[in-house]
Image: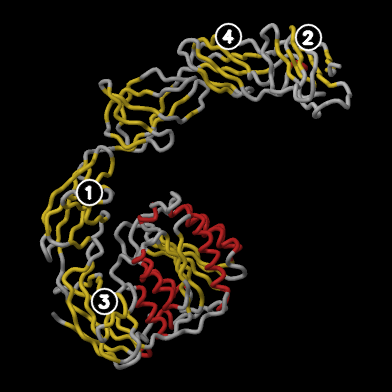
């Protein structure tokens, strides 16, 4: 194996900068009024955070709040990357140049709403361009990213170059739902530049991270702490291609640390001396492949570059085709003996041990696919999944008055339910002709044949319907409380549903029975028949009632103060409400009632009373002598 050493003093690191920076003619703004936001709009920002919020949506909301409240009097600019092209490592654009937060907020908000996650993650290129945006510094950069560099560059190396060249720019990093390994790499950017790193794994955490970043930017710039002794390790294969590595750094048989390789940080050592590095290519399952050991002597302060050649493991990637056209695909899981060994995403290159694997993936229910492939050491295998054609189907319904409504529906064929379509999100299906069903208590769809062939285009289906408005009327005296609901029963289909008074309720043509809310008054049900396109009003009126007040005669002989009484209907009338309270006026249907006192308070003689409609009645209970 070939080992290459190169000592680099901090003071000698990359002192040359693009001529454009040296030839700036416009005066740079004051150091304390420049903040550049660099926003990740790569394809992976479509993903979800731990609270199921979309990464791009959580970022958009948090950035807007940050611009509104976290900038103060400083000038702000907005740059995005990965927002235009799928495979372009130079896709980074200054969308809003420097201006005050007050004048730039609307433009940044508009840019956030217009761009869509699309492509790669060119962090290093974007930071280089950001330094030009800042006129060479000084200032702060807020970098928001949900992943590490994907364009064969090392942003942490760039930060070391900036440090060596005296660039006065702090990069504060917000990591969006990162793994531990990704977090290590992104933290390196912040640490070396003198900035701070913040985690954002939920929408709430996103807002908190940007609040903390705002506080960090307001603090005095930290005093740079130069790396005294360190080893920057680059693992390569026999062709010179860099590989992500894993291993250990040792001295005198003591393990100093896990090994970090190029792009993920440097390996700090306590001082001059002889060290041993044992490293190998990192596999997708997190283990190391064929460790190679080498000795290295550190004598000078600074970062020593070490290039170590290691065996290249087998590698695998996957692509998806649908009708001969590229498809975004889904996560691929590699199995051996029915156990998952590792997984990777479309477009990723995953390293693995040689052997035979079952590669399983399921972009949707119609494409649960498995490929069996043998991987060989040092060789690359590209899996190609040929998908059954599917489309995203949406169904919406229209009422006779032109209103469009969304609700769940089902696609059937030959008596078998094949798909359930969500009211809003639809479903991925095979294009074709189906029987559409959509059940609803008040407005069921008569099954209809539909043909779905257009991806993402909603199909609109008319619903035969009439409209029912339920109202409450009659004498207010006959109500116990104001009714805020009613109940609608279908006499044709059976079943009963909740209904809100006052609004026009779409219902299928047919016969219905309207029930009043029996906790507010006594009602007889009302039957109505509704035809297609017809509007009907059903007015519920309460039955007449009388009023009864029960009280206790004054006495010092009560065993306890009587705070309740009991009223029983002798003619089978229903009573609304619970225990009768002394002095409370209660509404009762006409008829005979028996009023009894509370036996715990004493012995009372029951009294019978007849309630008449519209009249007020009173009963006074007295202790027996």
Which dot marks residue 248? 3
| Residue 476 in view | no
Q: Secondary structure at mark 2?
A: strand
Query: Which sits earlier in the primary sequence, circle 4 or circle 3?
Result: 3
Q: Which mark is residue 279?
A: none
Number of disc labels: 4
Q: For the residues carrying marks 4 and 1, which lies nearer the camera in this image? A: 4
Mark earlier in primary sequence (3, 2): 3
Position of the C terminus, as image quadrant, is top right
Residue 571, x across and y down, in percent: 69, 6
**Camera-nearest residue between 60 and 101:** 60
Residue for point 23% across, 83% down: 276
Q: Secondary structure at mark 3?
A: strand
- The residue at which mark 2 appears reads as 608
Residue 320 has which mark? 1
- Marks 3,1: beta carbons within 8 A: no
| Marker disc for residue 527 | 4
What residue is at 19 percent from the left and 50 percent from the top? 359
Q: How far is disc 4 from disc 1 in space, using C-alphas?
A: 59 Å
**In x, y percent, where is residue 376?**
10, 61
User: Closer to us: mark 2 or mark 4?
Assistant: 2
- Mark 3–mark 1 Cα distance, whole angstroms, equals 38 Å
In the rendered view, tell whether residue 304 sits above or below residue 602.
below
Mark 2 burial class by Cα count in 10 Å: few <14, some 14-19, many 20+? some
Q: Nearer the viewer, residue 88 or 496?
A: 496
- Can the viewer see residue 625 in this picture? yes
Q: Residues within 10 Å of mark 3 (few under 14, many from 20)?
A: some
């Amino acid at each position: 194996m070939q080992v290459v050493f190169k000592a680099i003093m901090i003071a000698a690191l990359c002192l040359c900068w693009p001529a454009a920076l040296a030839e700036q003619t416009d005066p740079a703004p004051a150091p304390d009024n420049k903040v550049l936001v660099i926003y990740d709009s790569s394809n992976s920002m479509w993903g979800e955070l731990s609270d199921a919020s979309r990464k791009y949506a959580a970022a958009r909301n948090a950035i807007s709040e940050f611009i509104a409240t976290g900038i103060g009097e400083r000038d702000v600019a907005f740059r995005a990357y990965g927002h235009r092209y799928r495979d372009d490592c130079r896709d980074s654009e200054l969308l809003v140049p420097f201006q005050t937060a007050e004048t730039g907020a609307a433009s940044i908000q508009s840019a956030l709403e217009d761009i869509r996650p699309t492509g790669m993650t060119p962090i290093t290129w974007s930071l280089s361009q950001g330094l030009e945006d800042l006129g060479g510094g000084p200032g702060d950069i807020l970098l928001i990213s949900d992943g590490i560099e994907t364009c064969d560059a090392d942003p942490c190396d760039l930060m070391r170059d900036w440090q060596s060249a005296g660039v006065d720019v702090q990069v504060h990093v917000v990591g969006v739902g990162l793994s531990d390994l990704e977090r290590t790499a992104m933290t390196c950017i912040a640490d070396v530049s003198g900035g701070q790193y913040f985690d954002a794994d939920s929408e709430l955490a996103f807002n908190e991270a940007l609040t903390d970043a705002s506080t960090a930017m307001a603090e005095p710039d930290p005093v740079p702490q130069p790396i005294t002794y360190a080893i920057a390790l680059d693992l390569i294969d026999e062709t010179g291609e860099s590989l992500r590595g894993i291993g250990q750094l040792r001295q005198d048989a003591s393990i100093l640390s896990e090994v970090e390789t190029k792009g993920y940080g440097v390996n700090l050592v306590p001082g001059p001396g002889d060290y041993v590095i044992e490293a190998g290519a990192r596999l997708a399952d997190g283990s190391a492949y064929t460790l190679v050991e080498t000795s290295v002597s550190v004598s000078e302060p600074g970062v020593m570059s070490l290039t170590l050649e290691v065996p290249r493991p087998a590698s695998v990637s996957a692509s998806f085709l649908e009708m001969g056209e590229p498809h975004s695909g889904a996560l691929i899981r590699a199995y051996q003996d029915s156990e998952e060994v590792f997984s990777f995403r479309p477009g990723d290159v995953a390293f693995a041990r040689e052997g035979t694997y079952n590669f399983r993936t399921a972009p949707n229910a119609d494409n649960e696919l498995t490929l069996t492939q043998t991987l060989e050491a040092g060789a690359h295998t590209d899996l190609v999944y040929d998908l059954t054609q599917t489309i995203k189907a949406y169904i919406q319904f229209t009422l006779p008055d032109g209103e469009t409504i969304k609700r769940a529906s089902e696609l059937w064929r030959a008596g078998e339910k094949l798909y359930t379509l969500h009211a809003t999100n639809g479903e991925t299906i095979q294009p074709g002709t189906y029987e559409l069903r959509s059940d609803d208590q008040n407005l069921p769809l008569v099954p209809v044949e539909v043909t779905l062939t257009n991806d993402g285009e909603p199909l609109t289906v008319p619903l035969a319907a009439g409209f029912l408005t339920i109202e409450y009327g009659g004498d207010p005296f006959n109500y116990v409380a104001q009714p805020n609901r009613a109940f609608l029963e279908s006499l044709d289909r059976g079943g009963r549903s909740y209904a809100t008074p006052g609004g026009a309720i779409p219902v299928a043509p047919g016969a219905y029975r309207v029930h009043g809310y029996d906790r507010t008054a006594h009602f007889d049900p009302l039957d109505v028949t509704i035809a297609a396109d017809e509007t009907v009003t059903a007015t519920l009126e309460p039955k007449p009632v009388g009023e009864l007040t029960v009280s206790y005669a004054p006495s010092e002989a009560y065993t306890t103060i009587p705070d309740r009484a009991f009223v029983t209907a002798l003619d089978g009338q229903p009573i609304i409400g619970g225990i009768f309270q002394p002095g409370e006026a209660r509404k009762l249907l006409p008829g005979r009632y028996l009023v009894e006192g509370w036996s715990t308070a004493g012995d009372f003689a029951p009294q019978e009373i007849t309630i008449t409609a519209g009249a007020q009645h009173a009963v006074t209970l007295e202790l027996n002598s």
